Image: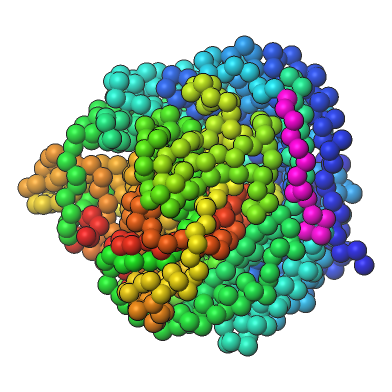
Amino acid sequence: MDNRLQTKMLGKDKALKILTDIVRKSEADQTEAVLVGNSEGLTRFGESVIHQSMIESNIRVIFRVALGKKLGIASVNSLNLEDLKKSLQSALQIARLQKENPYFESFPAPEEIPDLQTYYPETAAYSPQQRAEIIRQAIQRADSYGFRVAGALATGEGEMAVVNSRGLSVYQPYTQVRFNITALTSDGSGYATDTSRNIQQIDFSQLIETALEKCSNSRNPFPLEPGFYDVILEPPAVSILLQWMGHIGFGAKSFQEGRSFLSGRLGERITSSFITIYDDGWDLAGVPITFDAEGVRKKKVILIDKGVAANVLYDTLTGARDHKPSTGHAMLSGGFHGGEPAPLNLFMEPGEASFSEMLASIERGLLITRFHYVNGLLDTRRALMTGMTRDGTFLVEEGKIKKPIQNLRFTEGILDAFSRVKKISRERHRIGFWGSEIGACVVPALLIQGFHFTGKTST
Amino acid sequence: MNTKDFLKETVTYLKQKGVDYGDIRQVHTTRQSLEVKNGMVENLLEDLDQGFGIRVLVKGSWGFAASSTLTEEEMKRVADQAVEIAQASARVNKRKVQLAEVEPCIDTYRTRIEIDPFQVSLDEKINLLLQADEVLRKDPRIKVAQGIMGFNRIDKIFASTEGAFIEQTVWESGGGISVIAVEGSEVQQRSYPQSYHGDYATRGYEFILGMDLIKEAERIRTEALELLRAPECPSGEKTLILEGSQVAIQVHESCGHPIELDRVLGTEISLAGGSFLTLDKLGKFRYGSRSVHITADATLEGGLGSFGYDDEGVKAQRTDIIREGIFVGYLTSRETAVVLGQKSNGTMRADGWNRIPLIRMVNINLEPGEPSLEELIADTADGLYLSTLKSWSIDDLRLNFQFGCEMAQEIKHGKLGRIFKNPVYTGITPQFWGSCDAVCNRNFWHIWGTPNCGKGEPMQAAHVGHGTAPARFHRVQVGVRK
């Protein structure tokens, strides 16, 4: 039996034809049409039961038109020609009412974008039965420990096309898998996660075992007073800090408005020289995507280069303001970043340390699996953030993991913390952006001296 | 086939498929959003979104499938998918879902509005935001001046195999203004009526007109500039009076989320976490002081969490959550209410046609008390008055929280004094609410609308409300310990 649920993908020729035809009908000086389609299945489980399993198919077309320097945007989730024409007319009507945008020069010109494999048929074809089977394995393994499991497995396919009246015409199909698992018992929990374009890259058994082992080791946690501790932050903990840095500071908008920790500091040393962070949509080690919401080829941009503030991410509008070309980081209007340029493929350079070397160098400190509910809005110029530990926080003494501890709250300037990095692991992990269906980090573990914990939890 | 016939046809098809239970929601949303920044119209967009979602219960397991193509052929394909998905889950699940009974309703519901926001010209909306923007930018230290508005019209039809057929039209309007002032390395922000997204309600354009944005622009610009040179907020254990919108976010994070029964039962644990309000605490746990009376009320006119029926066809209700400080009620669904031997109190909502309903806050309200704000301040010898959310974080059981506010004002001998920047306070939920000794009266009570409450996978943004007034709390840790 072919388990594949019928694809809703249009394919390159049909998607580009629909957009090209409608763009040709536009009366605007310039017109851009973006098509985003997706068909994704997601199965969630909790208390070792599948409590939600679903599939969604949707296609949205977003029009952006220019009348001189006046811009109008409208969107619709229909491919019906009358609906498309109506939406295009709405965009035109909005543009007529707009004020001029002094930074608008033009929609992007066409450029060569090489092919990159981002679509894997086996991932697209992954069925609800196959997702349920993975979860059955997780439940069975958890049963053998006497634990419960919770999490989610999402698999699906999507496509994105951009056409504009200057002749730009680009298309990319993609697939994606996201998996997270939390193992639980009455007095402990453990966590593991991975994401990829290709389901073959996901080692489900290993992830399940990691979560169960963490849970087993985290039982009977004891209270520890807040204070300054040396810490090893495992990749999920590092990832959420980078995701927040992307949200508050790597994009040109926050940089230009003076809100970013990079504002006015390009060329300055802001972290330890061990730290290099970049965004690269082409690196197959991550979750690649080759062009942005304006159809501009994604450039590899080094954001922090050996501790020095190096660059920010531009779309065409923010780029024009700084007389810089777009770096290919335009977001769809109205998205998580409110249409501001933002990273979706963050990487931190690995170091040379093994995990055991990192552990061995700690006299007294903590091993942190992940953070919960991090907020980076306390003071964005310092990247001051707060959050709680969860799902495996351990005391390390004399280079050995001694015992689990109860969760702690940190409040820490992340640039300061990254200035106190002592070791970086050579191994890196892919971690999907928290709470988002797009975006991922590829990050190592970090050993940071004197991380500031400011509170603890209690009942 | 018209929409009503389409839904009826779907229900017939689901019955033919032999599902234990099935429902279909068809949702059509019109959205308009405007953003003015530094004298320019930064964003102005309109969006139309429509589709349907089919939810089925087969052999005790759920399946859900959704599509934006409204044809009979597509409906059958999607219904078949939903059944196939449920069957796949049923092969794994040892526990079968049971649903609390509900009387199937045939009804219509429409938000009462005075001015349809979609009939107000874009020119008028833009001009109002630009006028406020001009006031906000009357000082070179204001680096970012922003004004936003958003309007939604949601037309939704729900039909179930049990016979429910409910049509609803909900209008939502909202907006606000904010500034960021910069001087050297100092950055300070002020917002009105709330930070980050403004204030929202199930009202028409009259809600925007009632905000008096131009007058308030003057105030928040002045306050942001004063904050640039204000001293740091002093640390230590303090008496706090929280301004109404800050009480709203406190209710949201430390009460609204932990009373969601699906969280309590473990279905959100991997993403958003669980809850300290475990089943054994119902009816006996002291959550707060006797001054703390919290209700869940989806029937309040104008509240952003108000509607006629939830997305399981359960009628909107008012429920006690905390009564004189004692925890007495959860937010429930038909599935989770069975655990308590109760009927659903109608809180299942989905973020659009393509999302499965989850238990979501409605309007979670701290009921008003006796004093006026002036009386409460006059009754406070030494404390701080904290305004407007700046940062927020809470642990995975909703116990340890930390909030930052935009501005603190000293209270000395019953009078407001100088302002402080960067106030942060932290606490443990039951201890914090246990220290609440006064809530201001109904004249100071307002239903704050939060249009971006995140939960679930895929992430769903719910539109929820919080009726709150300023309230006083004692012995609260201000600042982070060194």
Outermost residue toward the front? A352
- Please tell me which residue lies in front, A237 or B366: A237
State whether residue B467 appears in this view. no
Q: Which residue lies at the image location 51% right of the left edge and 77% below the top edge?
A: A214
Outermost residue toward the right? A1
**Residue B248, percent from left and from top:** 37, 50
Judge left or right: residue B369 versus residue B70: left
**Residue A166, percent from left and from top:** 73, 19
| In the image, residue B46 lies in the stretch drawn in magenta | no
Q: Is B204 located above or below residue B79 in the figure?
A: above
Quadrant (top left/top right/bottom left/bottom right) for the C terminus of chain A: bottom left
The stretch in magenta equals A110-123
- Please tell me which residue lies in front, A177 or A154: A177
| In the image, residue A118 lies in the stretch drawn in magenta | yes
**Residue A231, percent from left and from top:** 38, 66
Q: What secondary structure predominates along the stretch shown in magenta?
A: loop
Residue A132 image-quadrant placement? bottom right
Quadrant (top left/top right/bottom left/bottom right) for the N terminus of chain A: bottom right
- Please tell me which residue lies in front, A67 or B187: B187
State whether residue A10 appears in this view. yes
Q: Which residue lies at the image location 74% right of the left edge and 30% below the top edge?
A: A112
Outermost residue toward the left? B413
Q: Is A139 located above or below residue B101 in the figure?
A: below
Q: Is B312 located above or below residue B118 in the figure?
A: below
